Image (spheres, rainbow, N blue to C red):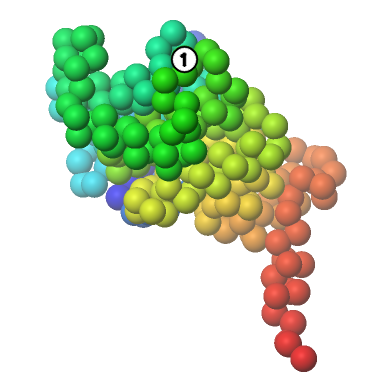
Amino acid sequence: MLELKNLSKTYRTGDKALQNVTLTVPKGQVMALIGPSGAGKSTLIRCINRLVEPTSGSVILDGTDVTALGSGALRKMRRKMGMIFQQYALVERLTVMENVLSGRLGYVGFWRSYFRKYPQADVDEAFRLLDRVGLLAMADKRADELSGGQRQRVGIARALIQNPRLLLVDEPTASLDPKTSRQIMRLICELCAERDLAAVINIHDVALAQMFVERIVGLKAGELAFDGKPVEMTEDVLTNIYGEEDWHATIREVDDEDAEAEEPVA
Ligand SMILES: Nc1ncnc2c1ncn2[C@@H]1O[C@H](COP(=O)(O)OP(=O)(O)OP(=O)(O)O)[C@@H](O)[C@H]1O
Ligand SMILES: [Mg+2]
């Protein structure tokens, strides 16, 4: 469903942020993207919806070459790609409901949204989504009255009301405590499963990625350095991606758990 072919990005400063990245994300797959700071994770996500213009290579979504689209067609294509950010990017003085509805901007046109005249079907869907993310009671609260976890739930509902085919998620849990981080990752992954959505999730917390996703891709200095299942993420792989360290506490002992599970029942 999503194909990146030889995707490269060199910024004007000369920084080679991405170099010949080729990968395919099938329909419904949730993929985590890990790698050290500056490896190019945000650049990769932003090249997919062309918030950052790739220098070369192509991005193909459901058979359409996104990199070849003109501005009108790109705007339509972006509806298919929901974005979720680390800093939530909510409009502080608007309510939770209004923030969620702003996800329909790509559909309803500027003036209609300016006067906040959203179709009833959109409002109904916003209520359904707020219920699903556990925020129904907060629909009328202002965004600046929410906790980080609640804000991220609004961000998730706003991305989903777009009815996307793909979620692009940039460090959704970086500002959250460990428990809230798990809840947010779980929610994103459950929603992807419910809606058969593919997702690319940038994440620094390797153990959290291992806990929830089916595939992990590692970037190192703009190049692919790992692509595999969570169980294949060993200390050696982490050393290759991040450099020498004691990684023991960082990764989940997935192998041990699997071994336990395979023990014959007496
Ligand atoms: N707008 C920009 N102009 C110039 N260089 C940039 C720009 N954005 C990013 N870079 C450079 O591109 C490289 C990749 O940056 P990017 O933000 O994609 O990394 P990242 O993996 O998301 O890092 P982090 O984990 O810190 O968020 C870095 O060397 C960075 O300095
Ligand atoms: Mg980043």
- Which residue: 55% across, 47% down? 186
Please identify the quadrant where the C terminus is shown: bottom right
**Looking at the image, can residue 190 be seen?**
yes
**Looking at the image, can residue 55 be seen?**
no
Residue furthest out toward the front: 137
Q: Nearer the viewer, residue 201 or 220?
A: 201
Percent across and percent down for residue 90 are 44, 17
Residue furthest out toward the right: 246
Choose top left, top right, bottom left or bottom right for residue 91.
top left
Q: Secondary structure under badge 1?
A: loop
Percent across and percent down for residue 111 are 16, 10
Choose top left, top right, bottom left or bottom right for residue 94.
top left
Q: Which residue is mark 1?
A: 142
Q: Nearer the viewer, residue 231 or 11?
A: 231
- Which residue: 70% across, 32% down? 177
**Relative horizontal placement of residue 170, taking residue 233 as reference (left or right):** left
Residue furthest out toward the bottom: 266
Percent across and percent down for residue 25 are 39, 50
Mark 1 is surrounded, within 10 Å at the Cα level, by few (under 14), some (14 to 19) or many (20 or more) other residues, namely: some
Choose top left, top right, bottom left or bottom right for residue 219.
top right
- Which residue: 28% across, 37% down? 125
Percent across and percent down for residue 10 are 44, 21
**Relative horizontal placement of residue 113, taking residue 210 as reference (left or right):** left
- Which residue: 47% across, 15% down? 142
Give amino acid for label 1: Arg
In this rendering, the answer to whether 160 lies above or below 191 is above
